[in-house]
Image (cartoon, rainbow, N blue to C red):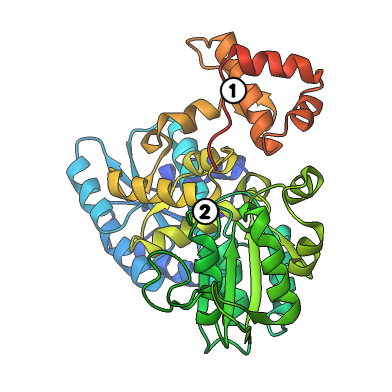
Amino acid sequence: MKAKILLIDDDASLRRVLEYNLLEEGYEVQAAASGEEGLRLFKQFQPDLVITDMKMSGMDGLKVLNAIKESSAETLVIIITAFGTVDVAVEAMRAGAYDYITKPFNRDALKLTVKKALRFSGLAEENKRLKNALSDKADFRSIVGSSPEMEKVFEVIRKVADTEAAVFITGESGTGKELIARSLHANSSRRNGPFVAINCSAIPRDLLESELFGHTKGAFTGAIKEKYGKFQLAEGGTIFLDEVGELLLELQPKLLRVLQEKEVEPLGGTKPLKLDVRVISATSRNIEKAIADGTFREDLYYRLSVIPIHLQPLRERQTDIPLLIKYFCAKHCNDRISFDREALDALISFSWPGNIRELENTVERLLIMRSSDVISLSDLPDKFRDHNTLKNGVVKLPDEGYSLEQLEREIVIEALERNAWNQTAAARFLRIPRHTLIYRIEKYSIEMPER
């Protein structure tokens, strides 16, 4: 669809030249000879962009700008002003004009300014659509996404939230596994009960059994009073076992019994206690490999994984990144902030090894350190600009040159990140033998980031 531009200028010859140049670029153009006529056409034509001269007889450009902004705040306006009257243009910018061009101007300057304005307008419209999409996902609390991968996750949540089925969530660190668990709880009949989360990898080895199942007074040295475990605290609600793949092998049979018998026996206790708890668990570990290695019980896995949900890493659902950026801007009270296309493209194409958690931290930092309300590529940390040397499989080298070794190192890291640091898969991706990949990993001292 052609972009629609309304042109307002009382200089007939200049108006014809401008109209010709815009038509030649493929835009749909309506021209008006005065501010009053321009406003009448504005209501009928509903343009994507307005270009108006500042100095006109009758209604001047500033009055036209104010009237358009009152009627349609999102419509962009470019002001034409004479050379030497830049102070007037600055006043117009303060009143809401997108940009200005000074007379006399050349054709290329006009084309460039118009293209930038329409691109910015498209980005604003996209942000508006994403904000509406965000409100549509209100039932899922803080889960944000409109990609096909996330739509599948939402569909599973709708179907299983209000059941008693055990749900097993897998995905890399930072992909939002706890948000999924909380959404399942919030959309269930247990929503008024407690939601108790425990990170199985964060509790010291000798305290984990007590934390999970509780203990009686005198059960061990230092047990000076009875303590309820997380399962008891979750009575009538949901317990979320995060990083369950790290659970000690010796505790796994006891957890399996809790799941099978629906009862828990505190450490040092003499009789089991009945439980009414729904279990949701998650891991960032390759659970199939853990089962094959003998570090995770297969029967426990099948008991936990009645309903499996897998969360794709952010690099594999790039269409969600603009929506997430908008959400994080609003979350940190800066929803007036926008990103220009180059900055947005750089963020979308980045591999995000830290997934959503890393993206949120990046957005928050950009909001604090920004120099204006439109964040550009120059505002981004160096790693995002450097990453653009590899984009969509096409190498884009800077004019000043680039280190071949650095480029090769980036390619290897990119392949590893895309394949969850699986060396065999990364070698297949790069179409090289695995031993060749390992040689380059050692050559460039590449280390897998800590989860």
- What secondary structure is found at the residue carrying circle 1? helix
Badge 1 amino acid: Glu
Return the residue nearer the eye: 365 or 20.
365
Asked if one can make out residue 416 in the rendered structure from this viewpoint, the answer is yes
Question: Which percent across, then down, holds residue 137?
Answer: 59, 73
For the point 50% across and 67% down, which residue is it? 211
Residue 109, compared with residue 68, is above or below; it is above
Picture quadrant of residue 224: bottom left
- What secondary structure is found at the residue carrying circle 2? loop
Badge 2 amino acid: Arg
| Mark 2 neighbour density, 10 Å: few (under 14) some (14–19) many (20 or more) | few
| Mark 1 neighbour density, 10 Å: few (under 14) some (14–19) many (20 or more) | some
Quarter in which the N terminus is drawn: bottom right
Question: Which percent across, then down, holds residue 189?
Answer: 63, 90
Return the residue nearer the eye: 11 or 278.
278
Return the residue nearer the eye: 70 or 442.
442
- Where does label 1 land, which residue? 410
Quarter in which the C terminus is drawn: top right
- Where does label 2 land, which residue? 205
Residue 44, compared with residue 88, is above or below; it is below
- Residue 372's disc number: none
Question: Which percent across, then down, holds residue 267?
Answer: 54, 72
For the point 54% across and 29% down, which residue is it? 387
Picture quadrant of residue 438: top right
